[in-house]
């Protein structure tokens, strides 16, 4: 079992996002952040 199923939580629904090609993708909402965002 994976202890770390995802990355940071989605700000919209709190589900774990995954990091792909310089983007954080929520399984529910799609791309939420990318490299151009300054919210880190």
Image (cartoon, grey):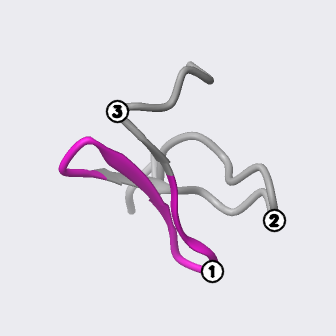
Q: Is residue 28 magenta?
A: yes
Residue stretch in magenta: 20-32
Estimate the x, y position of residue 9 in percent, counting from the top left. Answer: 67, 47
Near-viewer residue (20 or 2): 20
Q: Which quadrant holds residue 20?
A: bottom left
Residue at left offset 77%, top offset 49%: 11
Q: Main secondary structure of the magenta part?
A: strand
Relative placement, left or right, of 30 versus 35 is right
Q: Nearer the viewer, mark 3 or mark 1?
A: 3
Residue at left offset 55%, top offset 20%: 38
Near-viewer residue (15 or 30): 30
What is the secondary structure assignment of the residue under circle 1?
loop
3 in relation to 13, above or below = above
Q: On the image, numbered disc 1 is attached to which residue? A: 28
Estimate the x, y position of residue 2 in percent, counting from the top left. Answer: 38, 56
Verify CB contact (< 8 Å) between mark 1 and mark 2.
yes
Looking at marks 3 and 1 on the same chain, the residue that comes earlier in the sequence is marked by: 1
């Amino acid at each position: 079992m994976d202890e770390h199923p995802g990355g940071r939580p989605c700000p919209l629904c709190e589900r774990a996002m995954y990091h792909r090609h310089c983007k954080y993708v929520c399984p529910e909402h799609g791309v939420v952040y990318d490299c151009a965002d300054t919210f880190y």
